[in-house]
Image (cartoon, rainbow, N blue to C red):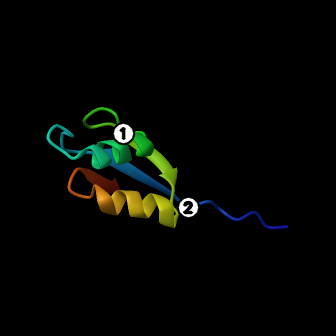
Amino acid sequence: MAKTKIKMIKIKQTKSRIGAPKDQCRTLDALGLRKLNKVVELVDNPAVRGMINKVNHLVTVID
């Protein structure tokens, strides 16, 4: 059986969460972004894409 390669996505927090609404701060926490300029690698699925879309002004997707 051939193994399927899991697609991963790298996300970097580029702007501060100060002044952001509480739901956006919680979304950053759920993504694992707790400090500025931190990079996390997550599985690329619709749930993660939706969270990125919610805080797209605070994060950058690294390919």
Residue name at image x 49 percent, y 61 percent:
47
The residue beneath circle 1 is 33
Front-lying residue, 54 or 13: 54
In percent of width and height, residue 16 lies at: 18, 39
Query: Given this view, does label 2 or label 1 mark the residue nearer the observer?
Result: 1
* Residue 63 visible in image: no
**55 in relation to 4, above or below:** above
Among all residues in the image, which is located at the extreme right?
1
Question: What amino acid does circle 2 point to?
Answer: Lys
Q: In this view, does 63 lie above or below 32?
A: below
Q: Residue 44 carries which label?
A: none
Name, please, the residue furthest toward the top: 35
Q: Is residue 5 left or right of residue 48?
A: right
Q: Element under label 1? A: loop
Residue 2 against residue 60 in the figure, above or below: below
Quadrant assignment for the C terminus:
bottom left
Label count reads 2
What crowding class fits label 1: few (fewer than 14 Cα within 10 Å), some (14-19), or many (20 or more)? many
Seen at 40% across and 63% down, the residue is 50
Q: Where is residue 27 in the image (x, y as percent from the top left)?
A: 37, 48
Q: Which residue lies furthest to the left in this view?
A: 19
Quarter holding the N terminus? Answer: bottom right
Check disc 2 and report the residue beneath it. 7
Image-quadrant location for residue 22:
top left
Q: Is residue 53 above or below residue 15?
A: below
